[in-house]
Image (cartoon, rainbow, N blue to C red):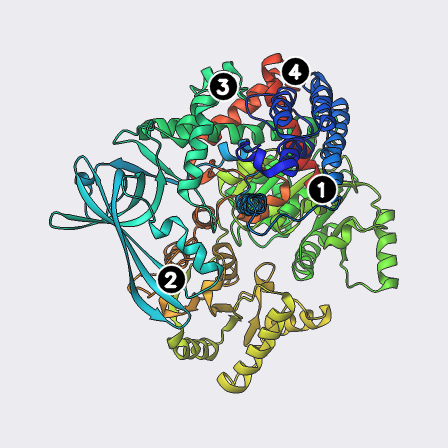
Amino acid sequence: MLDYAGMAKDGIAELARALSGPLEVEAREGYRDAAVIGQGIGEYARKWAERAKKVVRSEADRARCGEIAECLGGYGGGGVDERRRMARKAKALLGALGSAQAKAAARPRKRPAAGAESAGLEESFARGRTARLAWAKRLAKLGIETNRDLLYHFPRDYVTLKRVAELEEGERAAVVVTTGPREELVVGVRRGYRLMRYALQVRDDSGEALLTSFARVPSRGARSWAVGSSPLALNYAEGTRLLIEGTARRSGPEVEILYGGSERLDGDEHLKPGALIPLYPLTEGVYQGQVRPVVRRLVGSLPERLPDSLPRSLRSRYKLLDLRRALRDIHWPESAKARDGARRRLAFEELLMLQVALAQQKSEMQAPGSGISMQPRGDVVALLEEILPFSLTRAQQRVLAEIVGDMSSSTPMYRLLQGDVGSGKTVVAAGALMVAIQNGYQGALMAPTELLAEQHYLVLSRLLEPLGVKAELLTGSLGGGERRRCYERIASGEAQVVVGTHALIQEGVEFHRLGLVIVDEQHRFGVRQRAGLRTKGPRADMLVMTATPIPRTLALTAYGDLEISVLDEMPPGRTPVKTEWLPLKRQEQAYEFVRAQVAGGRQVYVVCPLIEESESLQAQAAVKLAEQLQEEVFPELRVGLLHGQMAVREKDAAMEAFRTGKTEVLTATTVIEVGVDVPNATTMLILNAERFGLAQLHQLRGRVGRGEHESHCLLLSDGKYDPSGRMRPEGEESGEHTWEHTRRRLRVLLETSDGFAIAEEDLLLRGPGEFYGTRQHGLPDLRLARMAREMGVLEEAREAAFWLIGEDPKLEAAEHAELRERVAALRVRMRSAAG
């Protein structure tokens, strides 16, 4: 846990917390004896007891501290159950610590005279406790509770350490200086606060500079005190040695440094020019000058032989640093080369844990002989082309061959099929279903929405009924009697193909002989839902599909236990969609374009601005927009409405009216993102396009361009989001939600229609944790391995993982002990997420 500084002053509560913290971490991480870096719980408890005996006042408490240390002394040698018992007993003893002192404190005492020294000390100690508790809460926001958390709180960036004379105009850098005189100036007064300018003279052996900062200081209250006592106020005595960073401004020989952070240096701390100074992710009330010295001391105190999850043989094979060196060089690298070596090692470690877990999972799920061998009766491609009005693309033929090969084997199929909008995944799914039916098995296809399920049902029924295949649709909106009859047809095997929503996994749905499970738009389902359908046929093959392309980097990470097939060719007849951005002030021009399209016999989608709060609010907004379009904008046209809160019959009626041309303009929410196919619809108008993600925008655009006519996608947004970058918005930009971040998203959509290129860019913009809800897999929070930028490392880690599992499937070798424990803990998380 964090240092003992101030423990004597803080008393029994702080004392107990110093040991209970690691024990809580042990409980969270499965009692692996890994809560304290560089030493086991037993050794930590012994040292804790030595210090604690100097703090507690009663003999009973001193004896209790010794008993706690003795209780945990054999922690490292025990199994999980034994460690759990030891930890619980130690926590019970900790709870009793100080009970005698508390009773004594509860007795009536003579009140000290006003101003007595003891009262002043108690008040001082109370303030200290409050400050430290507040500090702990702020650190917790960053996910920091233990020394290990601090070691793995990696810098977000670095600045180069320079001398004052070397600073260039506009450069962000760091310098080590000695402080001189300080002054402060009120530069503005507003209602309730003052705008302050603080200036501090600083110098090193090469020259002088003026360090400046600005702050809004409330006229009164705790916030005013907090600003005045923060590093921002530059309130350092003359002669203080500081490490400061900021942006340089030069005017002739004069140098000004706009304050970016500061840290007091001890006399024996020597930093060399050219070194990289870490900049850490922070939160309100936490400063670089607080985090850096703590991490520096922690890194400096690491033992020479630090337990390493990567065995020596693996480090040697892939030329990786040992853990101690990597941690030192990620936090305080002497050069960019040292930093990059540390990043590679630590990213490799992150990815290896995940890849080993996936490799073990794949090995267990796909044990030879545990699946169903389903041999095709004849040429599946030829059979499909007999009932289709077109020939399959080369990509469809290749992917079908991969799937049929899997199904023919007695090893269970676990395959991810991904392809861009309109690449023909449903036809491939039909081919796989035919193989299952030829072998006397049923197939099930689960879709995330009733609209998409209905679309699949219509297409599959049309394809398979000429072959005598009976398809069934099961959704949540079926009435009681019809639902019961549907269940009976599924249980008897009369229903050979069952298409539905999550209603497929509900209690009461029993399949006669389920051999193939297909999950469409897989990223819209939770892990539990996908696993739930698999339990309906424990030996069934599984095919998961997505029309939202997944970057190879993410696919290897989130779906590393699945084989991957890609439909990378579009069927003939798909017309390119022309994409254009317009500012909202030209909205009327967009509406004129809609009128022209309808006059030419075409149809148009108008997508309602996205409202994140709730589907109900989104539905209300769509209703209001449809009314406005019908009454004020297009009174001469027939405007329809489709949103997720409508009853199934209403949705069906709205879609049927649009398919048949009775409705010319369809106002909709993102419910049309997938599963809607109207070839005569040639224009997609998206209002407030800046509110949508890249993947959503690409999916919406994919609803048009499905026929022979030229198609268009019009993106409307506020002028400040102009993707050309011609307009520079006023105001400060910060974090991920900047104008440029949004402009970049829209610019990508204008520049390419390649779904995989768009997905790679989306991954870069959003990061792996948020991309397609991968957090639901129970996957680790990848701190360094931003997969789009670590592709080479990912490939190496995957290769290493499958090599390791091939050599030692259960990681039983002695050198794999540390790796085995960490992978086991990760797999527990993944199983928990999967239910």
Give whichever of 114, 455 is nearer the camera. 114
Give whichever of 378, 201 is nearer the camera. 201
Whichever of labels 2 and 1 marks the residue nearer the N terminus, that label is 1
User: Residue 213 placed where, x, y %?
Assistant: 31, 54
User: Residue 385 placed where, x, y %?
Assistant: 60, 48
Q: Amino acid at mark 4?
A: Glu
Between circles 3 and 2, the one closer to the viewer is 2
Assess whether mark 1 and mark 2 are in contact (beta carbons under 8 angstroms).
no
Q: Residue at x 61, y 31 (%)?
A: 358
Q: Residue at x 69, y 47 (%)?
A: 110
Q: Is residue 762 above or below residue 743?
A: above
Numbered badge on residue 216: 2
Q: Amino acid at mark 3?
A: Pro
Between circles 2 and 1, the one closer to the viewer is 1
Element class at badge 4: loop
Numbered badge on residue 105: 1
What's the CA distance linking mark 3 and mark 2? 45 Å
Numbered badge on residue 467: none
Element class at badge 2: strand
Give whichever of 242, 831 is nearer the camera. 242
